[in-house]
């Protein structure tokens, strides 16, 4: 099999700061603007007059679509061009944001369509922009470019609650998505004119559409079961039927992928314990995004805080995650193996999540404790990020790094989607239980919302512990075993 870059790449075009700025802005359209729904969900429900379960699905469906299509989108970028696919992603981002900004009251159709399109946008942008940076920057310049990419993604996720609160409390949540549309246009303007970069493969790898659609059907059906089960009844015809559909689609996916020549998910990669531990822990740890949604809903619904006040509660998360990314990198270099910083990162995240579960505290005390909790969560995720990514990619052969990175990123998006959906489902189900039962479980003076939030947050503690277990029991102790 012979591979080469397109003619422009042969001429060794070098990326500049303009391209970096355009790429960072494209990443921000998802990690900053699309994620703001965590903090404006209550406002959106009230203004659009939509049900809780529907709005919960709208929040998590974006990450679901990103995870479901990111591997395919990466393959399309390699085949047809990374600049083209990034441009398509920006167009989808603008369309999705416009649909959300123009959502009419009394229906969730525009909101849901916009959120799905935003997910497809992120699936296009993330692998294509990373490949552009890999193609057009070398050595220290590449490290610098990737650092800016990480700042756009991690920094955007840390800033989203603050931005959402500031905009929602002043000019209204719809302006978040008008801004997102503008940012997508500016990003396109900066990237426009960049020479195309793609892989020319004599034996072109076909797109596994059968496996892709089986996987999408399985994930969407599972998502509906989790989100709607408590509302319509776990033994209702709809839930039972949807569960069967999800199971059948998942079975078809696994059977087909094991026999496919070019599968969406190469299961043989999981024969490597380091890669398995990194990917599993990445899946579970990204699931704790549900804690952000639940904590923000609690302080707004039960404590009466504004979206701006609740966003300020997460300020420590932003600072900690940006600072500790480099700390995690340095710890891995000092200790010589990714296992110990990954364990430290997961454990720190668990402690932060436990602080969030103390929902019986008075309002002022809970907000203070939650601030420190979010700071620890940000610190833990920052410490974990670089060692985990390095362990996942360095543990497989270079020829399989593309497939390995695609599955790793898929795991993070799907972990976020299912973690948010499950947390929201637990919260909505228990928020409607009898008040006397709620007090019996949590203690005198606490209402249903406090109970529901505590239960949902303890779920997040549980999945963070699963991430820790995946590292402790799966990650090799020495660097040589990881890189073998």
Image: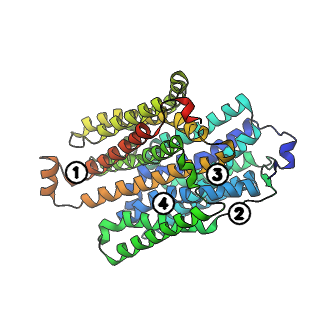
Answer whether labels 1 and 3 touch (C-beta < 8 Å): no
The quadrant holding residue 484 is top right
Along the viewing direction, whichever of 479 and 94 lies nearer the viewer:
479
Residue wearing tag 2: 206
Q: Secondary structure at mark 4?
A: helix
- Asked if residue 477 is positioned above or below residue 458 in the image, the reply reads above
Residue wearing tag 1: 451
Q: Is residue 337 left or right of residue 439?
A: right
Q: CA distance from mark 1 to mark 2?
A: 50 Å
Q: CA distance from mark 4 to mark 1?
A: 26 Å
Answer whether labels 3 and 4 touch (C-beta < 8 Å): no
Answer whether labels 2 and 3 touch (C-beta < 8 Å): no
Asked if one can make out residue 4 in the rendered structure from this viewpoint, the answer is yes
The percent position of residue 236, horizontal first and vertical second, equals 31, 75
Q: Residue at x 66, y 47 (%)?
A: 400
Q: Nearer the viewer, mark 2 or mark 3?
A: 2
Q: Earlier in the sequence, mark 3 or mark 4?
A: 4
Q: Earlier in the sequence, mark 1 or mark 2?
A: 2
Q: Earlier in the sequence, mark 4 or mark 1?
A: 4
């Amino acid at each position: 099999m012979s591979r080469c870059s397109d003619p422009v790449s042969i001429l060794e075009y070098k990326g500049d700061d303009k391209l970096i700025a355009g790429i960072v802005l494209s990443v921000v359209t998802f990690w900053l603007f699309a994620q703001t729904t965590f903090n404006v969900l209550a406002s959106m429900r009230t203004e659009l007059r939509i049900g809780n379960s529907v709005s919960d699905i709208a929040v998590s469906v974006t990450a679901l679509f990103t995870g479901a299509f990111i591997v395919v989108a990466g393959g399309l970028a390699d085949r047809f061009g990374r600049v083209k696919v990034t441009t398509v992603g920006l167009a989808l981002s603008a369309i999705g944001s416009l649909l959300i900004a123009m959502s009419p009251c009394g229906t969730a159709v525009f909101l849901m369509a916009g959120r799905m399109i935003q997910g497809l946008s992120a699936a296009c942008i993330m692998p294509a922009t990373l490949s552009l940076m890999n193609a057009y920057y070398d050595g220290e310049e590449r490290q610098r470019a990737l650092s800016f990419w990480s700042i756009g993604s991690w920094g955007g996720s840390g800033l989203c609650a603050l931005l959402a609160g500031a905009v929602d409390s002043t000019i209204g949540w719809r302006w978040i998505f008008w801004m997102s549309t503008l940012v997508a246009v500016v990003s396109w303007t900066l990237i426009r004119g960049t020479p195309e970069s793609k892989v020319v493969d004599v034996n072109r790898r076909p797109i596994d559409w059968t496996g892709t659609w089986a996987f999408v059907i399985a994930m969407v059906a599972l998502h509906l079961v989790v989100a709607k089960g408590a509302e319509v009844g776990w033994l209702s015809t709809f839930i039972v039927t949807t569960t069967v559909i999800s199971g059948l689609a998942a079975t078809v996916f696994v059977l087909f992928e094991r026999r496919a020549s070019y599968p969406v998910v190469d299961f043989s990669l999981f024969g490597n314990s380091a890669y398995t531990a990194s990917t599993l822990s990445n899946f579970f740890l990204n699931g704790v995004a549900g804690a952000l949604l639940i904590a923000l809903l609690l302080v707004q619904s039960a404590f009466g805080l504004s979206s701006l006040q609740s966003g300020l509660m997460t300020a420590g998360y932003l600072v900690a995650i940006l600072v500790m990314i480099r700390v995690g990198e340095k710890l891995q270099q000092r200790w010589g193996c990714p296992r110990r910083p990954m364990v430290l990162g997961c454990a720190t995240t668990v402690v932060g999540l436990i602080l969030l579960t103390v929902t019986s505290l008075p309002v002022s005390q809970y907000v203070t404790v939650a601030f420190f909790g979010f700071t620890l969560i940000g610190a833990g995720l920052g410490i974990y990020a670089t060692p985990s990514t390095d362990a996942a990619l360095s543990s497989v052969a270079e020829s399989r790094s593309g497939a390995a990175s695609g599955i790793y990123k898929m795991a993070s998006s799907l972990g976020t989607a299912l973690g948010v959906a499950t947390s929201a489902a637990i919260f909505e189900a228990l928020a409607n239980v009898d008040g006397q039962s709620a007090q019996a479980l949590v203690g005198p003076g606490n209402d249903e919302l406090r109970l529901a939030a505590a239960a949902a947050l303890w779920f997040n503690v549980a999945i963070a512990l699963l991430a820790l277990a995946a590292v402790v029991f799966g990650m090799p102790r020495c660097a040589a075993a990881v890189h073998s």
